[in-house]
Image (tube, rainbow, N blue to C red):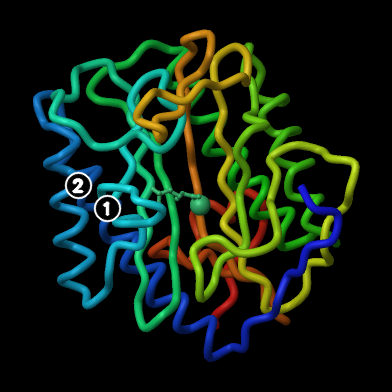
């Protein structure tokens, strides 16, 4: 990680463009989650996501990114991130993470969700919920914090507070986002030695905790994409693209702008 990273400020008009891109991602993820069930294949979900994105006049930003061959990542079980959609049907008891990105009028949105297929064991449900809660803790830290580093501190603390033997990934982090999917700065999900750039109005970040059962070490499959836990523990991944403004925070990839997720923290999303 470089020591000095920029965090640029978007104008209110640019934030509204990013909101439009974010809503496309939200719709695609909603469609994918609704369609996901035992017997459905990740390839089918990928086609649905791509069609939803294109129907909105946007383009799937993952497709072709560094040679990535699909419009979404579908990461099942011990796959943490970057699972390439395949033709193995989902099964009852699986936990599935879906990561999706869209670009609209040159502006990017990026988000991920994790959900169970049918009934899952308590440990899986806890992992999913602890990770989801840690994302919202990170979003709240972006609203109330001083520096990007405050986000990672909050995410890590939320995972700790959830209890259980959970690990927060070190090898992959969140990122700035805007006219490109990945920009400065890195957004770690853990406390680091550097505080990172100041959180200013106009900042847009993709906050994306990746949390696993057991140890946080990962390995990459021979396909050069699929990231798995080294110890076979299962994984969850939640992500939102978030904007901080003069007046507060807006979760660009949430249809309700974050109202439901922020409510337990006594925050209301700000209009753009
Ligand atoms: N959405 C991922 C991220 O947040 C990127 C997916 S990699 C891709 O960084 F190749 F699939 F696009
Ligand atoms: Co991302």
Q: Quick check: marks 1 and 2 in contact, CB under 8 Å?
A: yes
Point 27% across, 61% down: residue: 27
Point 30% across, 52% down: residue: 29
Q: Which mark is residue 71?
A: 1
Mark 1 or mark 2: name the one nearer the start of the chain.
2
Q: Are there few (<14), some (14-19), or many (20+) residues within 10 Å of tag 1?
A: many
Measuring from the top left, give residue 164's x and y in whole percent.
Answer: 62, 13
- Return the residue nearer the eye: 139 or 231: 231
On the picture, is 72 further left or further right than 22?
Answer: left
Numbered disc 1: secondary structure: loop
Point 29% across, 62% down: residue: 60
Measuring from the top left, give residue 25's x and y in whole percent.
Answer: 34, 61
Q: Are there few (<14), some (14-19), or many (20+) residues within 10 Å of tag 2?
A: many
Decide: is 178 above or below 84: below
Q: Which mark is residue 46?
A: 2
Measuring from the top left, give residue 139's x and y in whole percent.
Answer: 64, 54
- Return the residue nearer the eye: 183 or 39: 183
- Return the residue nearer the eye: 37 or 215: 215
Measuring from the top left, give residue 103's x and y in whole percent.
Answer: 37, 71
Decide: is 103 above or below 271: above
Give the Cα distance between marks 1 and 2: 6 Å
Numbered disc 2: secondary structure: helix
On the picture, is 59 further left or further right than 242?
Answer: left
Decide: is 122 above or below 148: above
Point 66% across, 29% down: residue: 159
């Amino acid at each position: 990680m470089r020591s000095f990273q920029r965090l640029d400020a978007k104008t209110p008009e640019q934030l509204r463009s990013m909101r439009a891109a974010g809503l496309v991602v939200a719709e695609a993820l909603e469609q994918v989650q609704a369609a996901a069930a035992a017997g459905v294949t990740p390839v089918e979900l990928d086609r649905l996501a791509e069609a939803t994105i294109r129907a909105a006049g946007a383009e799937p930003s993952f497709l072709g990114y560094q040679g990535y061959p699909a419009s979404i990542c579908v990461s099942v079980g011990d796959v943490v991130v970057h699972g390439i959609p395949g033709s193995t049907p989902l099964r009852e008891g699986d936990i599935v993470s879906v990561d999706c990105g869209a670009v609209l009028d040159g502006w990017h949105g990026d988000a991920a969700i994790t959900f169970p297929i049918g009934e899952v064991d308590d440990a899986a449900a806890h992992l999913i919920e602890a990770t989801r809660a840690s994302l919202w803790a990170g979003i709240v830290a972006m609203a109330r914090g001083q520096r990007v580093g405050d986000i990672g501190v909050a995410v890590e603390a939320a995972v700790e507070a959830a209890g259980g033997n959970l690990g927060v990934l070190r090898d992959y982090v969140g990122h700035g986002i805007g006219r490109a999917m990945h920009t400065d700065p890195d957004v770690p999900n853990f406390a680091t030695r550097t505080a990172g750039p100041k959180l200013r109005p106009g900042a847009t970040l993709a906050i994306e905790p990746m949390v696993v059962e057991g140890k946080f070490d990962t390995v990459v499959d021979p396909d050069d994409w699929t990231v798995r836990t080294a110890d076979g523990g299962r994984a969850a991944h939640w992500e939102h693209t978030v904007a901080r403004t003069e007046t507060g925070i807006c979760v660009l990839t949430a249809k309700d702008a974050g109202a439901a997720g922020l409510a337990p923290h006594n925050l209301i999303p700000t209009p753009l």
